[in-house]
């Protein structure tokens, strides 16, 4: 997957988790939780959806890398490059 593909996939997952959010105003540098008021269960839903859709295993210690769009894409690029 390309960087653009990964970003699109994350946006799709976020739209499923928070369907009322306007994702066009999402700041790629800013923390998802702060922008979208996601709770810990919503955040876990993102991780679980990545696992379900792409079989990407993300250790709990690495959740810190999924804070913003840019950090999430950067973290996922090597994991999803061959998909």
Image: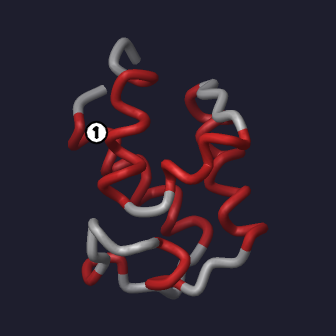
The residue drawn where x is 50% and y is 53% is 66
Q: Among all residues in the image, which is located at the extreme top? A: 82
Q: Could you tell me which secondary element the residue under label 1 belongs to?
A: helix
The residue drawn where x is 31% and y is 26% is 1
Q: Position of residue 67 (x, y in %)?
A: 48, 61
Relative to 59, 28 lies left or right:
left
Q: Position of residue 70 (x, y in %)?
A: 30, 54
Question: Taking 4 as reference, is 46 above or below it?
Answer: below
Please identify the quadrant where the C terminus is shown: top left
The residue closer to the viewer here, 31 or 21, is 31
The residue drawn where x is 47% and y is 72% is 32
Relative to 47, 78 lies left or right:
left
Please tell me in which quadrant of the rendered image residue 40 appears: bottom right
Question: Taking 11 as reference, is 7 above or below it?
Answer: above
Relative to 2, 33 lies left or right:
right
The residue drawn where x is 62% and y is 78% is 38
Q: Which residue is mark 1?
A: 5
Q: Position of residue 25 (x, y in %)?
A: 26, 83
Question: Taking 66 as reference, is 29 above or below it?
Answer: below
Q: Position of residue 35 (x, y in %)?
A: 44, 84
């Amino acid at each position: 997957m390309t960087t653009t593909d990964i970003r699109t996939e994350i946006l799709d997952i976020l739209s499923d988790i928070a369907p009322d959010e306007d994702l066009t105003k999402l700041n790629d540098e800013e923390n998802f939780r702060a922008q979208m008021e996601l709770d810990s269960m919503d955040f876990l839903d993102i991780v679980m959806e990545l696992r379900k859709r792409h079989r990407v295993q993300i250790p709990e210690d690495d959740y810190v890398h999924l804070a913003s769009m840019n950090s999430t894409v950067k973290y996922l690029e090597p994991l999803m490059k061959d998909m």
